[in-house]
Image (cartoon, rainbow, N blue to C red):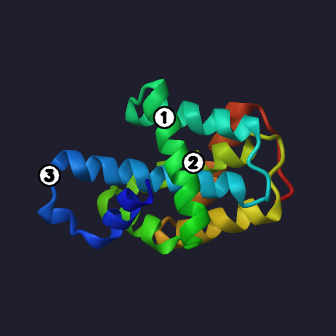
């Protein structure tokens, strides 16, 4: 499983077929979503359900593909422990709007358990910086998620 993540960082994007590049984006996005869920030390069922729904809607994955993607992302997060490789893929291959959407998805996962703690907020701030999403756009993404989920205000 982890071999796919290692290949993600070793190979250049231009030298790969389009299908492989799409899969790399899915792997990187999945890893960031899992990292967001794990950042507070508890990857609970609500966060897992949120990531499942996101992967199925954003990448049109079926149930088995989604389960496999989450398992691989969990393993990669545990083994690598660094954001740079995942964020580099997103930064290099997503448009500015897609990068802002990625931040919105991270907020969605963070809010899934009903509590955004300082670790989750800090992770999203770091990811936003690494993928060149401004503080203003990060804040707007958070507010869109809060509005969609009916959350008035968050202390973090």
Q: Is residue 50 visible?
A: yes
Question: Disc 1 on helix, strand or loop?
Answer: helix
Residue at image mark 3 = 17
For residue 70, what is the image quadrant?
A: top right
The mark closer to the camera, 3 or 2, is 3
Whole-percent x, y for residue 21 in the image: 25, 53
Whole-percent x, y for residue 83 in the image: 53, 70
Above or below — where is 81 with respect to 151? below
The Cα–Cα distance between marks 3 and 1, rounded to whole angstroms, is 22 Å
Q: Which of the marked residues, 1 or 2, is nearer the chain's N terminus?
A: 1
Residue at image mark 2 = 104
The Cα–Cα distance between marks 1 and 2, rounded to whole angstroms, is 19 Å
- Residue lying at 83% horizontally and 51% vertically, measured from the top left: 154
Q: Is residue 57 visible?
A: no
- Residue lying at 55% horizontally and 66% vertically, measured from the top left: 128
Q: Is residue 41 left or right of residue 138?
A: right
Mark count: 3
Q: Residue furthest right?
A: 155
How many neighbours does mark 1 have within 10 angstroms: few (below 14), some (14-19), or many (20 or more)? many
Q: Which of the marked residues, 3 or 2, is nearer the chain's N terminus?
A: 3
How many neighbours does mark 2 have within 10 angstroms: few (below 14), some (14-19), or many (20 or more)? many
Residue at image mark 1 = 66
Whole-percent x, y for residue 18 in the image: 17, 48
């Amino acid at each position: 499983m982890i071999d796919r993540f290692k290949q993600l960082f070793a190979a250049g994007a231009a030298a790969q077929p389009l299908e492989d590049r799409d899969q790399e984006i899915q792997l990187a996005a999945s890893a960031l979503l899992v990292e967001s869920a794990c950042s507070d030390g508890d990857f609970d069922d609500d966060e897992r359900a949120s990531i499942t729904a996101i992967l199925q809607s954003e990448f049109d994955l079926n149930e088995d593909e989604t389960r496999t993607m989450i398992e691989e992302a969990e393993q990669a997060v545990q083994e690598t422990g660094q954001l740079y490789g995942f964020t580099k893929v997103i930064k290099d291959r997503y448009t500015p709007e897609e990068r802002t959407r990625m931040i919105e998805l991270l907020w969605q996962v963070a809010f899934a358990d009903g509590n955004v703690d300082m670790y989750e907020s800090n992770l999203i701030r770091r990811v936003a910086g690494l993928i060149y999403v401004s503080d203003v756009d990060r804040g707007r993404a958070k507010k869109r998620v809060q509005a969609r989920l009916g959350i008035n205000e968050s202390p973090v």
